[in-house]
Amino acid sequence: MAKVCEVCGRGPQFGNRISHAHNVTKRRWNLNLHSVHAVVKGAAKRIRVCASCIRSGKVQKAGKVQKPAAAA
């Protein structure tokens, strides 16, 4: 299964691991993916979403009651 967020499309980033002796080997930084039960096109579906999309509110979780906006 691909390490890709289904909302924003972000994938792993690649770079080099550098030791104290400056030996260079390949490495990758994976996303912080979570399997979330979310509402997609009006239906509840399990999707793999990165933590930044969950925190920013791009994902509406299924079964969660939305709080009404507070009147100022």
Image: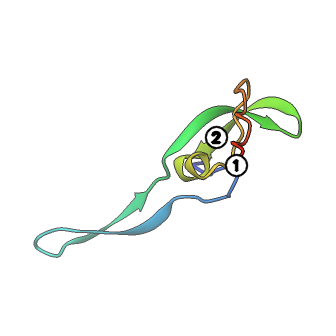
Residue at the spot 10% in from the left edge and 73% down from the top edge: 21
Query: In this orientation, which residue lies closer to the viewer: 2 or 54?
Result: 54
Residue at the spot 50% in from the left edge and 52% down from the top edge: 31
What is the secondary structure assignment of the residue under circle 2?
strand
What is the secondary structure assignment of the residue under circle 1?
loop
The answer to whether 39 is drawn above or below residue 14 in the figure is above
Q: Residue furthest front?
A: 72
- Residue 28, position as x, y percentages in the image: 42, 60
Residue at the spot 59% in from the left edge and 45% down from the top edge: 54
Q: Amino acid at mark 2?
A: Arg
Question: Callout 1: 10 Å neighbours few (<14), some, many (20+)?
Answer: some
Query: In this orientation, which residue lies closer to the viewer: 24 or 2?
Result: 2
Q: Amino acid at mark 1?
A: Glu
Tell me if label 1 and label 2 are in contact, CB under 8 Å. Answer: yes
The answer to whether 43 is drawn above or below residue 55 in the figure is above
Q: Which residue is mark 1?
A: 6
Q: Which residue is mark 2?
A: 48
